[in-house]
Amino acid sequence: MGNEIASCGSPYGLFRGSVAVGLGDVSYRALRSNAYRRVLHDVYTTPDQPITHEVLCHAASMISPPGTMLTGCSAAVVYGLDMADAASPVELVVPEKERFGPVRGLRIHRGPVRLCEAVAWREISIATPARMALDLMLRSAPRTKTLTGRLRAAVAYVDQVLRKGLVTEDQLSRLLVGRRDWGVVLARQALTLVDARAESPPESELRVILAMDGIPAEPQYVVTHAGQFLGRLDLAYPDSLVAVEYDGRWHEDPEQMKRDEERRAALMRRGWRFVLVRHDDLSGDVSRIVAKVRDALRAAADFSPLKSAA
């Protein structure tokens, strides 16, 4: 009988344990058995229901007080972006007056929410794409990270939002006017670095690292010759014919490696130089990445056609 109640009116078979017990449909002992699966505090589902971050968001909406807003990476998941998984806490903004939390599995922030920044969603509300993007930038400002480290996270988040077309840079710029939220200075700086052309978070991070060191690169640069498409580069310095590319773990696939090698060989015959960055490079000492790029740019300048002619 409890499973019938669980599947009625809520997505993913979610139900409040305390409500079901109060109605006499299930006992606390049964809730603790293998017949049910606990999702969050007082929220349960059937044991065969996979737990994703979106399921957690729906569960959080069932136990949060009125006026709560889903935001950040959690709102991004609901909007169709892969920014959080089942191990990630659900991000909420809760009114200051509410004595709610802490709750395991929830990341609770407190503060005001303007009426124009949220829309109704389930039992609570969800941030508009613009407010969501703002919170993604504001939440990327922990004092434990360097400025570049904070900007890497903020820009990588917002690039994804922009690329999906959920919001524009102009909308975000208007939203920042007159705000005094903690982290808003970093948010304004992040907005000067975002670019909707970025195709992956690591690519965004790499672009920020280079820009913060004074050597900004152009993302997703298309190379052609005599009207023929030769390739598209993650990051490029067209005047120097230097390309910087991120090779993630999926590039280790033999077929992908072959395609990468053929594309790069064709471009190298046209004078392009490549600096390849891998996952371990990006998670380590990034000054080494910057040094490799600067070396490539210097080498390109030393062997430029004008110098060779001289």
Image (cartoon, rainbow, N blue to C red):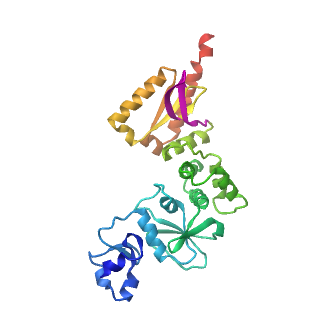
Membership of 225 in magenta stretch: yes
Write the residue at 37% across / 33% down.
Answer: 257
Image location (x, y in percent) of residue 10:
42, 74
Residue 266 seen anywhere in this rendered image of the structure: yes
Furthest-left residue in this view: 34
Query: Residue placed farthest to the right in the image?
Result: 178
Q: Nearer the viewer, residue 160 or 136?
A: 160
Determine the main secondary structure of the stretch shown in magenta: strand
Which of the image's four quarters has the C terminus?
top right
Identify the residue shown where x is 38% and y is 77%.
8
Residue depicted at 45% across the width and 58% down the height:
84
Q: Position of residue 250 (x, y in %)?
A: 38, 41
Residue at 59 percent across and 18 percent down: it is 304
- Please identify the quarter of the rendering in which residue 300 is found: top right
> Residue 159 in the image: x percent, y percent?
56, 49
User: Looking at the image, is 94 positioned above or below residue 191?
Assistant: below
Residue 114 appears in the picture as rendered: no
Above or below, comparing residue 229 to residue 45 in the picture: above
Percent position (x, y) of residue 306?
63, 15
Query: Quick check: 307 above or below 182?
Result: above
Query: Which of these two is toward me, 251 or 211?
Result: 251
**Magenta highlight range:** 215-234
Quarter of the picture holding the N terminus: bottom left
Q: Is residue 44 left or right of residue 212?
A: left
